[in-house]
């Protein structure tokens, strides 16, 4: 089994990583793909730094930085993983990563912004849940889990 762990550096995304580690330590045979999706380049960024290589480098650096906490947890647990930093709409890009890496499952955190906000803005976890052709497990923030 190959599990995709989308990580944005938040505590809830690291909670999802810890949960994946727990599953693996309990006997789940799984490979892990850590992913971070950076927002697409804005028009302002293109004007300020017209060299696409600079923008790509900054985006890759930011994504790598946001993966560091998850990488440390996986290394400490002895879990082998691959990393991917991509750019684009987070929901669609996560689905692309699932397909490109042949993942069998997505395990991700949910920020739980509330039903009104997610209805207006959409939510990455909702988008992935509806578009994925593989099972998606959502890990909630601690406050949501106890409510």
Image (spheres, helix red, strand yellow):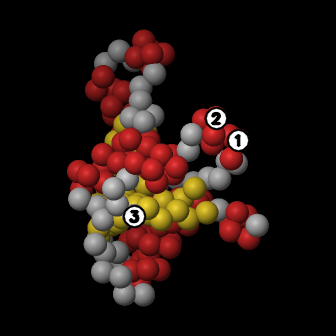
Q: Residue at x 58, y 60 (%)?
A: 12
Q: Give the residue number, with chain letter if any, for mark 3.
A: 135
Query: With respect to residue 69, does 123 lie above or below?
Result: above
Q: Are marks 2 and 3 in contact (CB under 8 Å)?
A: no
At label 2, counting other C-alpha atoms closer than 10 Å, the crowd grade (few under 14, some 14-19, many 20 or more) is: few
Sequence-first tag of 2 and 3: 2
Q: Which residue is drawn at 65% across and 53% down?
A: 112
Q: Nearer the viewer, residue 112 or 65?
A: 112
Q: Quadrant of the C terminus?
A: bottom right
Q: Regarding mark 1 in the picture, which secondary structure is present there?
A: helix
Query: With respect to residue 33, does 127 lie above or below?
Result: above
Mark-to-mark CA distance, 2 and 1? 6 Å
Picture disc at residue 120: 2
**Which image quadrant is residue 55 in?**
top left
Picture disc at residue 74: none
Q: Quadrant of the N terminus?
A: bottom left
Q: Which of 139 and 74 is in front in this view?
A: 139
Mark-to-mark CA distance, 2 and 3? 25 Å
x, y percent for residue 13: 53, 59
Query: With respect to residue 33, does 96 lie above or below?
Result: above
x, y percent for residue 87: 37, 37
Picture disc at residue 116: 1
Look at the image and tell me whether residue 69 can be seen: no
């Amino acid at each position: 089994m190959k599990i995709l762990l989308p990580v944005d550096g938040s505590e809830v995304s690291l909670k999802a990583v810890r949960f994946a580690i727990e599953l693996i330590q309990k006997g789940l045979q799984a490979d892990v793909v850590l992913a971070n999706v950076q927002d697409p380049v804005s028009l302002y960024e293109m004007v300020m730094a017209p060299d696409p290589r600079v923008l790509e480098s900054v985006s890759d650096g930011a994504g790598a930085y946001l993966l560091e906490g998850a990488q440390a947890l996986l290394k400490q647990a002895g879990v082998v993983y691959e990393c991917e930093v991509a750019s684009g709409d987070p929901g669609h890009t996560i689905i692309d990563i699932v397909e490109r890496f042949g993942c069998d499952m997505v395990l991700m955190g949910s920020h739980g912004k509330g039903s009104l906000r997610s209805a207006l803005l959409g939510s990455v976890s909702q988008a992935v849940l509806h578009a994925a052709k593989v099972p998606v497990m959502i890990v909630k923030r601690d406050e949501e889990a106890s409510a």
